[in-house]
Image: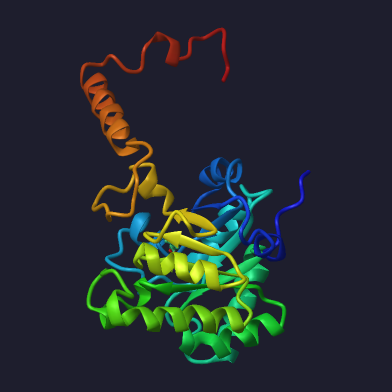
């Protein structure tokens, strides 16, 4: 079997063919993503897209571990990265290390991701020096939604310097890549030019070293809302609704199950 990509392999892709990244939360979807992706992220977006939570704030370590284990069973080639959930790392480097190590040990992930720039640099360095590869996540950081006051673009105008400093800080701390979420394209391009680690954009720029989307968003499975930066490559929720409607009609009309779906005294046993 093919060897999985490491954080170092991803790091080495700086400036090359763009990194293809998607989230996954289950084994079958991880298998589909793994066929094309360099990196599969078990995002804490799982709370919103699979569990119906209003934000990522109440996602727990146990949820990340359960979904991480499922994704690991479907991932062979891509680097699997697990998000550190809200309140599992912000207290300080020791808490972050304890929980990151647990995520890696219990899921087999090759790296973790955490949100935050300058104020997380010491924590990133602490993890990296102890053997845990870290992807940083700056710009719009959904775990800070209550402080940010909404899912707004970050780093416009005079605010650009803050995002630039965040990018420099996480790269200097040893992050092997950085997710740039919902920042102006020109700022994402400037950060991509300046840093020596790959930038992975979501609502950022085609000039980033890679792109990531939430898989349920790009498949049109999650359609509660659609951020501007999401491109729907399929409309699976519509297909699913149509299938469920047809099933309901056929059950009510006793058209399902048909003869080929039922068993006789002889013939097929499964
Ligand atoms: O949780 C998530 O899905 C993410 C990506 C959108 C980067 O953090
Ligand atoms: Na996330």
User: Can residue 98 be spotted in the picture?
Assistant: no
Count of marks, rendered view? 0
Q: Considering only vertical position in the picture, is 95 above or below 151? A: below
Pick the quarter of the image with the N terminus.
top right
Pick the quarter of the image with the C terminus.
top right
Q: Nearer the viewer, residue 46 or 182?
A: 182
Left or right of 141, for residue 109: right
Q: Considering only vertical position in the picture, is 200 above or below 163? A: above
| Quarter of the rendering containing residue 94 | bottom right
Residue 129 position in % (x across, y down): 70, 84
- Identified at 27% across, 66% down, the residue is 54
| Quarter of the rendering containing residue 131 | bottom right
Q: Considering only vertical position in the picture, is 26 above or below 202? A: above
- Identified at 64% across, 79% down, the residue is 174
Residue 250 position in % (x across, y down): 26, 19
Left or right of 139, for residue 21: right
Left or right of 258, for residue 96: right
Q: Nearer the viewer, residue 70 or 2?
A: 2
Q: How is the image coloured?
A: rainbow
Residue 228 position in % (x across, y down): 27, 54
Q: Considering only vertical position in the picture, is 40 above or below 218? A: below
User: Can residue 80 be spotted in the picture?
Assistant: yes
Q: Nearer the viewer, residue 261 or 169?
A: 169
Q: Nearer the viewer, residue 49 or 225?
A: 225
Residue 115 position in % (x across, y down): 45, 76
| Quarter of the rendering containing residue 238 | top left
Q: Quadrant of ligand 1?
A: bottom left
């Amino acid at each position: 079997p093919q060897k999985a990509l490491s954080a170092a392999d991803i790091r080495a892709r700086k400036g090359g063919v763009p990194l293809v990244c998607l989230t996954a939360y289950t084994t079958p979807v991880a298998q589909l993503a793994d066929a094309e992706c360099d990196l599969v992220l078990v995002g804490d977006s799982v709370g919103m897209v699979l569990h119906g939570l209003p934000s990522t704030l109440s996602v727990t370590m146990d949820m990340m571990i359960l979904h991480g284990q499922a994704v690991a069973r479907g991932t062979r080639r891509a680097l699997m990265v697990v998000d550190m959930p809200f309140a599992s790392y912000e207290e300080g480097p020791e808490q972050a290390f304890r929980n990151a190590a647990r995520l890696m040990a219990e899921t087999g992930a090759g790296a973790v991701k955490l949100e935050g720039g300058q104020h997380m640099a010491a924590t990133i360095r602490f993890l990296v020096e102890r053997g845990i590869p870290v992807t940083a996540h700056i710009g719009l950081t959904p775990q800070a939604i209550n402080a940010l006051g909404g899912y707004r673009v970050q780093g416009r105008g005079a605010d650009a310097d803050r995002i630039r400093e965040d990018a420099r800080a996480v790269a200097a701390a040893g992050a092997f890549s950085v997710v740039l979420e919902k920042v102006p394209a020109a700022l994402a391009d400037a950060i991509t030019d300046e840093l020596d680690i790959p930038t992975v954009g979501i609502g950022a720029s085609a000039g980033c070293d890679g792109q990531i989307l939430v898989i349920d968003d790009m498949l049109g499975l999650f359609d509660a809302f659609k951020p501007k930066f999401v491109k729907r490559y399929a409309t699976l929720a519509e297909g699913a609704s149509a299938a469920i409607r047809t099933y309901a009609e056929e059950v009510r009309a006793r058209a399902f199950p048909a003869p080929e779906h039922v068993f006789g005294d002889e013939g097929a046993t499964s």
